[in-house]
Image (tube, rainbow, N blue to C red):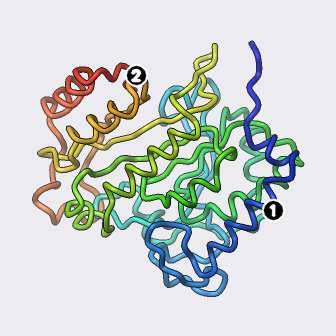
Amino acid sequence: METVKPSYLELHSSNKLAGTISLLKLKTSPCTICPHLCKVDRHQDDSGKCHSYYLPKVASASPHFGEEPPLVGYFGSGTIFLSNCNLSCIFCQNYDISQMNSGIEVSISELARVMIRLQEQGCHNINFVTPTHMIAPIVEALPEAIDMGLSIPLVYNSGGYDDENTLKLLEGIFDIYMPDLKYMDEQTAFELSGIHNYPEVACKAVLQMYRQVGDLQINDLGVATRGLIIRHLILPDNLAGTDRAIEFIANMSKGSYLNLMDQYRSEYHAYDDKRINRRITTEEYASAINLARKHGLHRLAR
């Protein structure tokens, strides 16, 4: 079986990666990394929407076996959970990490070493959760990690609220994008996650990701090497606009790899909202699966 080399290796060898690092660092002072455009100086101030300085905090880093099968493979996805987030989801199942600032701040060199340790443990990829607000230090750590032998794909595992211009700078760095497509209704996105224009922003982000990497490619061992994985969490009473999300994805590509997630449960502040203080029903999940198939989507994660 032919080994597929991650695209970031070519960027590094051609010295193009250094230019990307410089451009991303410029976008952190004032910060325009994500669609909030907070314009704070991330090197001195953490008052932006993500409440983060420039250096990342790592909440955990280990082989993860709960991701989609093509990411997990035999030895797990090397998942690095980064503290804080540019979303404020009232139902977040990882709220201690995303909204309570748990984690340990690491240097650029330490982040590079974390990637190498995960690769040495046999992980098939390095899976950053959530990279949106920390993309500048992540990319800054890459040259050092590459020089130490990093050679497995990188996964951009985000909430979908990603700036299209920032994503354009990442072309050739991430071989696998895995965004959420959370909502197709702007008001719902604001009420549940505190964000404006989510459907418009997220759809543009997904299209940009697809333009860069295309449909998911899987090798002979069943492991993903490149491409797009889309997640959509089904909420009670179609609150997430699942029907519209499916239609959008099918119109983009019927070869899309889609995970229609049925694991919603009331967490964090969701208990206080009557719209989402219950799990979805078997019928709601089956309806979503049937609708996806009706639209010609045949690569559904199960």
Residue 153: where, in percent of width, then height? 68, 37
* 10 Å crowding of disc 2: few (<14), some (14-19), many (20+): some
14 or 185, nearer to the observer: 14
User: Quick one: SS at disc 2?
Assistant: strand
Determine which of the numbered discs, if any, sits on residue 37 in the image. Answer: none
219 or 264, nearer to the observer: 219
Q: Which residue is mark 2?
A: 299
Q: Quadrant of the N terminus?
A: top right
Query: Of the residues shown, which amino acid type is indicated by label 2?
Result: Arg
* 10 Å crowding of disc 1: few (<14), some (14-19), many (20+): some
Mark 1 vs mark 2: which is more N-terminal? 1
232 or 112, nearer to the observer: 232
Residue 302 showing in the rendered view: no
Taking 142 as reference, is 26 above or below it?
A: below
Q: Residue at x 39, y 58 (%)?
A: 201
Q: Residue at x 65, y 43 (%)?
A: 154
Q: Residue at x 57, y 76 (%)?
A: 31
Taking 290 as reference, is 6 above or below it?
A: below
Question: For residue 59, what is the image quadrant?
Answer: bottom right
Residue 295 showing in the rendered view: yes
Position of 268 compared to 19: left or right?
left
Position of 162 compared to 139: left or right?
left
Q: How many marks?
A: 2
Residue 249: where, in percent of width, then height? 34, 35
User: Quick one: SS at disc 1?
Assistant: helix
